[in-house]
Image (tube, rainbow, N blue to C red):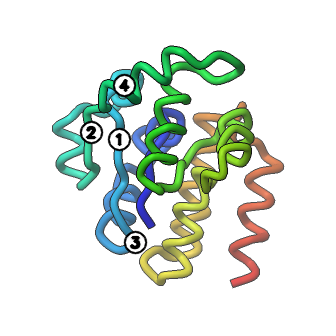
Amino acid sequence: MELVADANVLIDYAKTDPSILAIHVRHLGPIYVPSVILDEVHHLDAADCERLGLTVIEEPPEILLAAAERRGPLSFEDRVCLLLARENHWTCVTNEKPLHRACEQDGVTSIWGLRLMINLVQAQQLTRQNAMDVAQAIHEVNPRYVTAAILGLFEAELDKM
């Protein structure tokens, strides 16, 4: 699965356990980081991305122009993620509901940030306990987007495995 990452997901993992991103890249597929997104993430730089195996990409001018022209609830950076995902048939990974809705409307696959760890547990590349510990840490640093309710749903999903 090829992913394009939104800033909020990168920030969550950078603040808690960036190795999750590296494990995903090694075992499940590439994670692309648009340069405009990386500019928003003060906890990662290009060298960190390279070390983790993340692929920083320069956005084509036509994507930047299209993102600048569109209006609505999405930020410029969110529109870049959406347009890159649509253009390249990538999955958009974000914790923002408006971006998920826009992806659905445009026929783009999207997943929530914690889904990375569910997929890693399913692939036996991460233990359930490690996933729960990282999810709890993400909740603590980002309770606005990764609420206690979302944490409960994450645990229930892990319990199904």
Q: Position of residue 153 (x, y in %)?
A: 79, 60
- The tag on residue 33 is 1
Q: Secondary structure at mark 3?
A: loop
The answer to whether residue 116 is above or below residue 60 is below
Q: CA distance from mark 3 to mark 1?
A: 16 Å
Q: Earlier in the sequence, mark 3 or mark 1?
A: 3
Could you classify mark 4 by the number of other residues whose Cα lies within 10 Å: few (under 14), some (14-19), or many (20 or more)?
Answer: many
Q: CA distance from mark 1 to mark 4?
A: 8 Å
Q: Which residue is mark 2?
A: 57
Residue located at (18% from left, 50% from top):
51
Could you classify mark 2 by the number of other residues whose Cα lies within 10 Å: few (under 14), some (14-19), or many (20 or more)?
Answer: some
Residue located at (39% from left, 23% from top):
64
Mark 2 and 1 residues: CB-CB less than 8 Å, in contact? yes
The answer to whether residue 14 is above or below residue 72 is below
Q: Quadrant of the N terminus?
A: bottom left
Which residue type carries mark 3?
Answer: Leu
Could you classify mark 1 by the number of other residues whose Cα lies within 10 Å: few (under 14), some (14-19), or many (20 or more)?
Answer: many
Q: Which residue is mark 4?
A: 36
Q: Secondary structure at mark 2?
A: strand
Q: Which residue is mark 3?
A: 28
Which residue type carries mark 1?
Answer: Val
